[in-house]
Image (cartoon, helix red, strand yellow):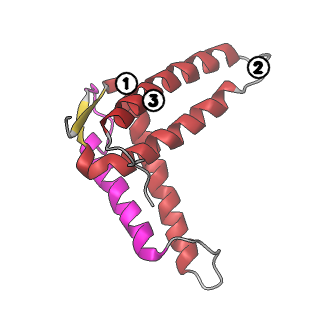
Amino acid sequence: MSNAITIPAETVKLLRASVLNELGNVASDIAQLTEPGGEEDPRTLPELLDQLDGHRALLGAIGHQQPQRQTQVHVDLSAHSAALRAAIDTELAVHREFLDVDPNLTGAATQRENAQRHIDLLEALLTDLTSRQAPGDSGHQR
């Protein structure tokens, strides 16, 4: 079983956006955790910092910026499995919401078609990722 996964070019763009969102979410959680009277979070600061580091490392592996011509990338699962799974899950949730659009709105059909295409790409990657993980390893960051 290979320790790397190939992410198709079209999916890399989706994941890059998701990883950037994940970075923002974790940074926000860190800010809330460290503010006096901040919201309760069951995660500790070291756990959140580990998540932040994981997302930053994945972003480094897939590329920080959209290149002129996107190509597939190979990602080391031993280093990036948890962050990759989180990015896929987040992006799937976003695109599933895009399916729920008023059909009377201009561009609704195109939005649904694009969302479904993106969901199909992400689900294929998720299936590949899941098949490469060790039994009992969900890939989720804790």
- Separation of residues labelled 1 and 3 (CA atoms): 10 Å
| Residue labelled with disc 1 | 10
- Which residues are drawn in magenta? 44-71
Compared to 60, does 95 lie above or below?
A: above
- Please give the label number shown on residue 122: 3
* 7 left or right of 90 in image: left
Looking at the image, tell me whether mark 2 or mark 1 is earlier in sequence order.
Answer: 1
Residue at image coords 44%, 51%? 140
As drawn, which residue projects farthest toward the front? 135
- Please give the label number shown on residue 105: 2
How busy is the neighbourhood of tag 2: few (under 14 within 10 Å), some, or many (20 plus)?
A: few
Which element carries disc 3, helix, strand or loop? helix
* 90 left or right of 107 in image: left
Residue at image coords 39%, 48%? 136
How busy is the neighbourhood of tag 1: few (under 14 within 10 Å), some, or many (20 plus)?
A: some
Which element carries disc 2, helix, strand or loop? loop
Dividing the picture into quadrants, the one containing residue 109 is top right
Q: Position of residue 124 (x, y in %)?
A: 42, 25
